[in-house]
Image: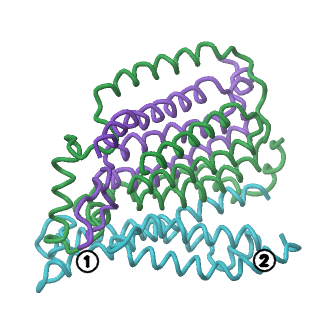
Chain colours: A cyan, B purple, C green
Amino acid sequence: MRGHLILRVVSKILIPFLLMFALYVQFHGDFGPGGGFQAGVIVAAAFVLYALIFGLRAMQKIISPALLEIAVPLGVLIYAGVGVYTWILGGNFLDYNMLDSHDPSHGQHLGVLLVEAGVLLTVSSTMLLIFYTFAGRGR
Amino acid sequence: MEGLNELAFVLGGVNHWITVFLIMAGLYIIVSRSNMIKKLVGLSIFQTSVYLLYVSPGKIIGGTAPIISDDFTVYSNPLPHVLILTAIVVGVATLALGLALVIRINEAYGSIEEDDVYSGEDWN
Amino acid sequence: MEFLFNLILLLFLAAVTIGIIGVRNLFAVVVLSGAYSFLMATLLIAMDAVDVGMTEAAVGAGVSTVLLLSALHLTNTEEAPAKHSNVLPMALALLTGAALVYGTWDLPRYGDPDTPMNSYVGDEYLERSIPETTIPNVVTSVLASYRGYDTLGETAVIFTAGIGVLMLLYGRRRKGDDDEGGDRS
């Protein structure tokens, strides 16, 4: 896609906004439509767009497959880790009320934030990793 | 308002029937087509028909999206949304796995047609 | 108005599905399935499932299409002509459809607020979300808090699928490139 000047310029302008939108969807998920799954897929889509326009090699320079292989299990670990942490604090598994000793609703917000971060990490990195393996197979 | 309710009753079945049509279409593609990528597309049509089957009974006419606000009193049912939200992402994960299998089959047999794959193999 | 919008989208959806059945070029099939996903996303948003519609637009029309296209790039873009008769699959589909339509006779009509599904547990979540979690988006609070176990399991499913794809496609590339190009047509 080296020759397609319009595609290159437009995608270069678009990708920061896509990532920004993904972050908005992620952190505004408590109050509007959105959450870890949607944000994760949008992040992956932004990077896939970059890889389609500028090539897989340029993309893998920014985020290497090895990094993604760490990120995929890390997301699940964060999620399960929140559960185990609430266990240690004396509550049930994934009982977010335990996370804040003063106000349970703060604990809920914190718990949802952490859990959604785990989901974001796993979903985005899995989608990107799957794309890498599919696209890398062709060369 | 009365007339609207009558119309609602008649049109209310359309959602179910189109859902059934999508299920039929998905099933037909999976059974009749021998091309594996077409089969996977059929499988995802089957899958999306289930989204419709779940979400459409949860809709309440005059309701709004289940985001609590002082401006609204009627909300659609949030539970099917949650179930389907997870189903969509699992769906793309299984689609990716299926496509990976198709690619491996293509490398091993040189074809993604089920008939070719079966005829190339000696079943005994 | 809500009904009309809904009806038009449903008919479009059915039309695109017929297109997917009929077309033999797989590239066209993939593009049509992208259009199908966008229609489905619009329909889901019309049904107030904003979170689901957003996910479907990003996943179905975005990521799935990219994956299908990259799979097509590695395989064949033309479907072989059918070798078998389509009578039996058609009969099977029609039989299933007839049974399901018979089943829909007892189902509540679209948009009815007094169905069992909309009376008990859904209302419960709507009432309890704000006092218990102070999260206004009930879908998020149910997804991440009330049904946190489900979502944990589902994150694990995605993780497993990712590992599965890696095991199927990633392993051989590391061994060497000697046997890579040979057997691919």
Is B50 on the left or on the right of C134, as rendered?
right
Question: x, y percentage for residue A137?
Answer: 73, 55
Which residue is drawn at the image coordinates 44% and 54% (left, top)? C46
x and y percent of residue B90 in the render? 45, 51
Q: Is residue A106 left or right of residue A123?
A: left
Residue nearer the viewer, C110 or A133: C110
Q: Name the residue under label 1.
A: A109
* Rendered view: A131 above or below A97: above
- Can residue C18 be seen in this snapshot? yes
Among the 4 quarters of the image, the one containing residue A104: bottom left
Q: Residues within 10 Å of mark 2 (few under 14, many from 20)?
A: some
Indicate whether C108 appears above or below C117. above
Q: Please, which chain is the residue tagged with disc 1 on?
A: A
Q: Estimate the spatial distance between the alpha carbons at disc 1 and disc 2, rounded to whole Å.
A: 40 Å
Q: Which chain carries label 2?
A: A
In the image, taking residue A44 as reference, residue B111 lies left or right, namely right
Q: What residue type is labelled 2?
A: Arg
User: In which quadrant of the rendered view does residue B16 lie?
Assistant: top left
Mark identifier at residue A8? 2
